[in-house]
Amino acid sequence: MEKIESKRPLIIAGPCSAESKEQTVNTALALAKTGKVDIFRAGIWKPRTKPNTFAGMGAEALPWLSEAKRLSGLPVATEVATAQHIEEAAAHDIDVFWIGARTTSNPFSMQEVAESLRGTDKLVFVKNPINSDIELWLGAIERLAQCNVKRIALIHRGFSSYRATILRNAPMWHLALEMRRRAPELPMICDPSHICGRRDLIGDIAQQAADLNYDGLMIESHISPEHAKSDARQQLTPDALNALLNEIKWRLAESDSAEFNVAIEELRRRIDHIDGEIFQLLVERMNASEEIGYIKRDNNVMILQSARWDSIVNRTLSLHKESGLSEEFLRTILDAIHIESINRQNRVMKGE
C-alpha cells in the first residue's frame, strides 16, 4: 500500500454499499480479474438524506471487506464519519479511508475525524463538501494536516446545484481545479458516479477528468447493479467498468514536439491578448454600473431591477444560442457580472 496514491491513473472501484458477504467478495474478485483496479471500495456506513432508507450494514460488513481483501489481493477502502467508525475499521485492517461530502461540510465532524486519525499512516481521501465552498474543503485538509495525517488525497464528486440538469451533482470543474492550484502536492481523483447519478453518463465525465490531468477515478461497481440497495442507477458491472476503462485516454502532460509547442505558444499569446481586452471591457462595464448606482441613489430608486436583468439574460442567451457556448457557462458569467454590479451599486448607496 505504500505510496499507491502516486500511481497514475489510480483506479478505485467497488459497490456503493457492502450488502452481503457474497456480493462484496464476488464483486472484489471480478474487479481484481480486470487487472485495472488498484483499490476495492465499499460503503458500510451510509449517511442517507432521508430516514428509513438503506443506511449500510455497519460494522457487520467489516469482516466481508477483510475477506474480499484476502481473496482478491486488493487493498480495501471504506467511508468513515466518526471516531467509532475509524476505530472499528482500523481493527479490521482497512487500508484506505475516505471522508464523505457531508462530513467535509461539517467542521465539528471533521475535527472529530481528524483527531481520531491523528498520526495514521493510512491513505485518507477527502471528498469535496456538498456545497460549492472551497474553504470547507481546504479546512478539512488543514485539520488532517494539523493532526499529522501525512497521506492525504482529494476526491472531486461534484457539488449540489439549485439548477436542474441531467447530472446528479454539478461538476464545477473550476472549483476542483482551483483546489488543485491551492494544494498541488495532493493527488486528486474524480468520482464520476456521484457526479452523474446515471451509469450511461459516466464515460464522458471520466474522460473529462482524464483530459484535465486528474490522477485517477473512483467508480461504483456492483456484481448485480439492478439489485443494489443504494444508488443502483449509477453502478456498473465489473465487465462494464472494464470496458469503460479501456475506452478512456490518459493523455500526456507535455509534448516534446517543436511543432506542438510553437502552435500552443501562438494560441496562448492570442488568448492573453483577448483576456486583456475582456477584462478591460469588464472594468468599463462596472464603471457604467457604478454611475447608474449614483443616479439611482440620487433619485431614491432601489438597486435591483429584476425586469431589466431578466431582459439582459434572455437577450444574451438568445444571441449566443448558436455560438457553441453552453448555457451553463453563459449563466455563470452573467451571474458573476450581476453580483459584482450589485456590490458596486451597494457601495454607492452606502456612500463608501
Image: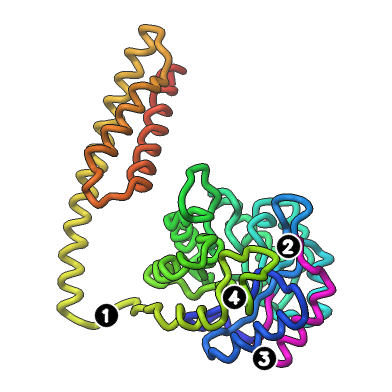
Amino acid carrying label 1: it is Ser
Q: Is residue 134 above or below residue 286?
A: below
Where is residue 147? Give x, y as percent: 72, 66
Amino acid carrying label 3: it is Ser
Residue placed most toward the observer, 214 or 186: 214
Amino acid carrying label 4: it is Ser
- Here the colouring is rainbow
Q: Which residue is mark 2?
A: 46
State the separation of the CA atoms marked 2 and 3: 24 Å
State the separation of the CA atoms marked 1 and 4: 34 Å
Which stretch did the figure color magenta? 54-77
- Specify the label residue 255 is tagged with: 1
Which tag, 4 or 2, sits closer to the chain's start?
2
Amino acid carrying label 2: it is Lys
Q: Few, some or many C-alpha atoms within 10 Å of disc 4 (few <14, some 14-19, many ≥20)?
A: many
SS class of the residue under badge 1? loop
In the rendered image, the quadrant that contains the N terminus is: bottom right
Which tag, 1 or 2, sits closer to the chain's start?
2
Which tag, 2 or 3, sits closer to the chain's start?
2
Which tag, 1 or 4, sits closer to the chain's start?
4
State the separation of the CA atoms marked 3 and 1: 38 Å
Q: Is residue 283 left or right of residue 133?
A: left
SS class of the residue under badge 2? loop
Q: Few, some or many C-alpha atoms within 10 Å of disc 1 (few <14, some 14-19, many ≥20)?
A: few
Count of number-bearing discs: 4
Q: Which residue is mark 4?
A: 221
Instruction: Characterize the magenta stretch by its predominant secondary structure.
Output: helix
Residue placed most toward the observer, 133 or 234: 234
Residue 103 visible to an observer of this rendering: yes
* Pointers 3 and 1 in contact (C-beta within 8 Å): no
SS class of the residue under badge 3? helix
Q: Is residue 36 left or right of residue 121?
A: left
